Amino acid sequence: MAERNITDYLGFEYEKVPLWTTPKELMELWKKEYEQGKQDGFIPVIIPLEDRLEDYLEDMEGQDYSADSLPEVKDFFAAMKQEIDDIDSYKGTMTAGDANDIMVSMTDYESGELAECVIIHLPTDKPWEAALLVPFGGWNDCPTPDDMAAVLKYWYEQYGAVPAAITHDTLELVLPKPVSREDAPQVAMEQFLFCSDRVTQCTKSGTIGELAGDLSVSTVWYFWWD
């Protein structure tokens, strides 16, 4: 029932992800779809077949977000920086980094099994519009869809980061190559402002420096809003 509901609700073409697909196979499947999308004019995004995501999408109904009038990224980062007390205490020291090259948001944390999911084909050649076509956010510290789209546009233009997986509370981006160690500290700070939980709950040390080290050797960016 979940598959019928959410795929019908979104109304986009989609491909089923075969049962027993491994996370590595899912990564290769998405890459294949992404290359096909360049020819056919779509962006592939993996979504789980779950009621919670559909509930979030329904909550967004009636809210008007336009790709033609996105907020200024610098204003978003500046505003978020103002909301964080003692930001220097989170900086830490940049590490050598642990590589992340596999999407994990569709994998059950305890069992390690892949959730039932599909790859939807978003009818756009602008990857950042995924935040507007599958919108969620605006609660707690999660950015609103238009803020999210503005940041994704900036990261795509700067680093080639493409939204590849969306759940009700996670977002994963895939890059053609890791950011340089020179750029990593700035990107890590931007990611902290975009999603503070990425640092405070998804690193061992709770520091931006650790995230910077990871980004310098990773082709997948992961965000989770508690």
Image (spheres, helix red, strand yellow):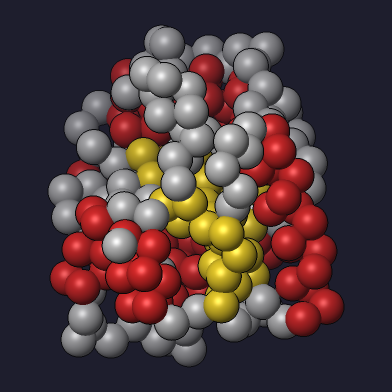
User: Quick check: 20 left or right of 147?
Assistant: right
User: Quick check: 35 left or right of 78?
Assistant: right
Is residue 191 placed above or below 206 in the rendered structure? below
Is residue 161 placed above or below 210 in the rendered structure? below
Q: How many marks do you count on the picture?
A: 0
x, y percentage for residue 127? 61, 69
Q: Quadrant of the N terminus?
A: bottom left
Q: Quadrant of the C terminus?
A: top left
Q: Is residue 80 visible?
A: no
Residue under the image location 52 percent in, 46 percent down: 172
Q: Nearer the viewer, residue 221 or 86?
A: 221
x, y percentage for residue 148? 41, 62
Q: Nearer the viewer, residue 110 or 219?
A: 110
Q: Is residue 66 visible?
A: yes
Is residue 221 placed above or below 100 in the rendered structure? below
x, y percentage for residue 190? 47, 44
Residue under the image location 48 percent in, 61 percent down: 151
Residue under the image location 74 percent in, 72 percent down: 37
User: Quick check: 73 left or right of 27?
Assistant: left
Residue under the image location 57 percent in, 59 percent down: 16
Which quadrant of the figure has residue 154?
Answer: bottom right
Q: Nearer the viewer, residue 208 or 42?
A: 42
Q: Nearer the viewer, residue 61 or 108?
A: 108
x, y percentage for residue 171? 45, 49
Which quadrant of the figure has residue 193?
Answer: top left
